[in-house]
Image (cartoon, rainbow, N blue to C red):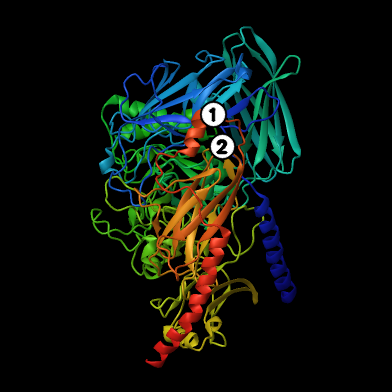
Amino acid sequence: MKSHFVSWKLLTVCLWAFLTLTARADYQPTYSTAGFYELPNTGRTVYSMNPGWRFHKGAAEGAEQTDYNDREWNVVSLPDGIEYLPAEASGCINYQGEVWYRKHFTPETSWKGKKLFLHFEAIMGKSKVWVNGKLLKEHFGGFLPVIVDVTSALKYGEDNIIAVWADNSDDPSYPPGKTQDMLDFAYFGGIYRDCWMIAHNDVYITDPNYENETAAGGLFVSYDQVSDQSAKIRMDAHIRNESGKSFNGKLVYELWDREGKQIFTQEKSLSVGKGKARQFSVQTQVENPHLWSPDSPYLYSLRVYVKDKNGHVTDGYSRRIGIRSIEFKGKDGFWLNGKPYPEPLIGANRHQDFAIIGNALSNSLHWRDAKKLRDAGLRVIRNAHYPQDPAFMDACDELGLFVIVNTPGWQFWNEAPIFAERVYSDIRNMVRRDRNHPSVWMWEPILNETWYPAEFAKNVVSILKEEYPYPYCYAGCDVTALGHEYFPVQFTHPLNGMGGAFNTDKLDPNISYFTREWGDNVDDWNSHNSPSRVNRGWGEVPMLVQAQGYAKTDYPYTCYDVLYRNPRQHVGGCLWHSFDHQRGYHPDPFYGGIMDAFRQPKLSYYMFCSQRPAQKNPELIADNGPMVYITNAMTPFSPKDVTVYSNCEEVRLTFCKDGQTQTYHKPQTKEGMPSPIITFKDVFDVMHDKQLARDRKHADSYLLAEGLIDGKVVATHKVMPSRRPSKLLLWADDEQVQATADGSDIVTVIAAVSDDNGNIKRLNNYEIQFEIEGPGQLIANEETFTNPRPVLWGTAPVLVRTTTTPGEIKVRASVVWQGKHTPVSAELIIPTRKAAHPLITNPEEVREAETKDVRNSASTSVGTSDCEKRIHQLQQELNRLKLKEVEKQQSDFE
């Protein structure tokens, strides 16, 4: 009986591996616009306003006027972060102050008779928006939508101008409020998220962030009595009638599953008076629902239609929803879908800061961030310390990541009433924006690490309940904060970590506890020396120290192992931090990420991967299942002890052909981290590798790790020493997501120095020059030391932005100083696909933006022909033959 079970278990692992890889290869994410997904034939169309904005850094008197001469301004596309920054951009080196954007365009004739809303996903700081010289919007705060009704302001058949003024300089009147030179993160400037034009008929589903209605506006989907057998769904839609006459019709809901099967249709009669708006509620029940969870992030498509009395659709769109229940039950911990969650929820904090571009990430970069974090086995992300891009929230929904949604704020309180009023406004608007996401785990409506009044804490809990008056809504705050008694979830460290609330035996049995930040182990909070803060370029030994500290310390400190040794009342924790990022108040970037600012993994990333379940899960888009990873790079300075990360039952390690094999068996214990770090003692011997090399047995020198389940090999990893650097490797770090030709998409490209066999040369100090050809631009220049770019731990990344023209982008990487023996250059082709939405812009300005990137002084010509490249390769082969005699002579004289 046992042998049959073993065979079936292995067969299941292999089958799921095949199915998951097949599904991943074909998967391409889609992104919502203004909170919805467009449906055909509804009268509602989405247009991208991202390409072609005139840009000016600094004050510009009169720039809001239509006759202002902006011809000398540069042309940029959104998202835009004002400037390119060096990879080390901490200490407030980024620009703080006024900026201007002006967009020229001719409205589409199809817009006539439509309602038109200009939807900025965010503009950093305080901002004003003019259309054709008329001020239509003023906004305070940099992390939530800025929405403008432009219906009556446009002029058809002629040039129209949108002018945006923004200022990200210090201002204590709105959150975060704290001066940036005292802030532990950096918020950069500009229109750094997408901008859409939403066109629809004059009887329509409203936008919740525009309407400013409590627990209303737009579409609000909530749940009750959720179980495996059934779930109650409440659907509230807010309909506005600007048609000039009363409207009678019906509201139609259709729920479709992932396989394209319709689950239900529900109708509600509508009657909306002229110039009025009303909210309509429909409740129904779904039988045998496929419930959403991190390990089964199942999304339904809810289609909403507004139909007139003749059955014609006047408006509509779809929204992805996940049916799930969330409950925090005090000492009984966290419950999901009516059942106790089986293990601690381990996650990480996330700033949306990215190397070079600051906060101005494309949608695909947000999706890739979520994908990489879910690949690492994380199940919850804390949006530190502000609401993050809608594309990131969409990604968390489909990849299976819970999210803690935060109010903008960090260690600052202003007694002036206007500050609290704007915080309250932010709370309302972040709930209205994100309330339909199944990934929302809890809300953090307070100001991070701030001594605000207790009355403020009471008020924000009341506001949250007003905005989300239905089940499964929870808020969290620090256990030491004033007013913490109003919160059902409180943030603290466990007793076996750093103590916190658990230092007392009087824990409130009605409170569940969570660690919002763990792992960062600094000295005096001024110098910020820490064994957890490691630049990837420092190499394997510092990275091993970081990974060990995050896994399990030999002193009381909150780490992965500690979080697994607690009662259910402590439900888990979020690592500080997932990625390296820039900071305002310190000259050094934060180096504590498990990935660097370009999202290149450190060794700790693989340690996290090894904590995920070994069983393959076909429900996940993210990488999952058995893994094994050797940390030893087999350099002359690599440790003798070989550290391996794996989630398998056994790991077999072999050093060199015909060498000794050691086997590790995972302890059979229910306590502590799922997969302890594996250390094989005194394995790597650089002198043995040297002897094999001298004997010309290079292929015999390697480390081979094999992960086994039920005695069968299910994962392998092989490392070989890198020999003579001979060529460059070049690949796109794109998570298999195809680039989009929308003028905004960004792809990270990685160059690596390698030997003939493709083994990356980790110890190398080359500088790499990047060149580009075709419909793309390098986000790099000499001024920011991003092109040429130095090699760190074997690799050098660069960012590539698409233009609005689909085609093939060719990227070339070469070493800066070319010689007879220097590595051969590499080329990469990046295909781009047509944009999903029509692009609204001035063609002349788009051409200027795509042919003249004023922030890029680097070469944009891929100048080496195939013939020249082949000559270089042949020259290298000839030189190697000549070197044989040199090598022999050196050996003779030793």
Camera-side residue of 5 and 639? 639
Q: Position of residue 345 (x, y in %)?
A: 50, 54
Q: Is residue 81 left or right of residue 156?
A: left
What amino acid type is highlighted by mark number 1? Pro
Residue on which disc 1 sits: 843
Quadrant (top left, top right, bottom left, bottom right) of the N terminus: bottom right
Determine whether the residue tagged by mark 2 lies in a helix, strand or loop: loop
Q: Position of residue 734 (x, y in %)?
A: 55, 52
Determine whether the residue tagged by mark 1 lies in a helix, strand or loop: helix
Quadrant (top left, top right, bottom left, bottom right) of the C terminus: bottom left
Asked if 416 appears above or below 547 in the picture, the reply is above
Marked residue nearer the N-terminal end (1 or 2): 2
The image quarter in which residue 84 lies: top left
Q: Position of residue 408 (x, y in %)?
A: 38, 37
The residue located at (72%, 71%) in the rendering is 5
Label 1 vs label 2: CA separation? Answer: 10 Å
What amino acid type is highlighted by mark number 2? Thr
Q: Is residue 744 visible?
A: yes
Rendered image: mark on residue 804: 2
